Image: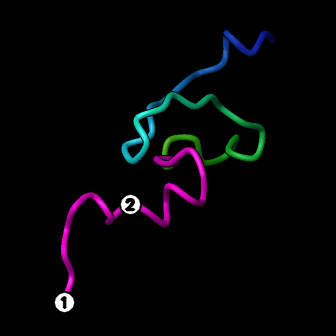
Amino acid sequence: MKKSDLPQKVCPVCQRPFSWRKKWEKNWEQVKYCSRRCAGNRNTGGSIES
């Protein structure tokens, strides 16, 4: 299978497309972020916490 044939999603944090990976095979439907870094930065979209 070619890489261009793999399913893709767009990361809601960095707005970049990312492709399916073997490690996400069993939970691809639940994957939202392209990386751990984006998952950790998901709440830094301008919100101020005090």
Q: Position of residue 21 (x, y in %)?
A: 72, 36
Majority secondary structure of magenta residues: loop
Q: Regarding mark 2 in the picture, which secondary structure is present there? A: loop
Q: Position of residue 27 (x, y in %)?
A: 60, 48
**Boundaries of the magenta span:** 31-50
Question: Relative to the observer, which residue lies in front, 35 or 6?
Answer: 35
| Label 2 crowd (10 A; few <14 / some 14-19 / many >=20) | some
Question: Relative to the observer, which residue lies in front, 23 or 44?
Answer: 44
Which amino acid, mark 2?
Answer: Arg
Q: Is residue 7 magenta?
A: no
Q: Position of residue 41 (x, y in %)?
A: 43, 63
| Label 1 crowd (10 A; few <14 / some 14-19 / many >=20) | few
Determine whether 44 is above or below 3 in the image. below
Which residue does the image show at 44% across and 40% down from the upper left? 11
Q: Earlier in the sequence, mark 1 or mark 2?
A: 2
Determine whether 34 is above or below 9 in the image. below
Q: Regarding mark 1 in the picture, which secondary structure is present there? A: loop
Q: Quadrant of residue 12?
A: top left
Which residue does the image show at 62% across and 28% down from the upper left? 19
Mark number displayed over residue 50: 1
Question: Relative to the observer, which residue lies in front, 19 or 25?
Answer: 19
Q: Is residue 46 magenta?
A: yes
Question: Relative to the observer, which residue lies in front, 32 or 48?
Answer: 48
Determine whether 34 is above or below 46 in the image. above
Which residue does the image show at 51% across and 28% down from the upper left? 17
Q: Quadrant of residue 3?
A: top right
Q: Which residue is mark 2?
A: 42
In the rendered structure, the answer to whether residue 1 lies left or right of residue 24 reads right
Which amino acid, mark 1?
Answer: Ser
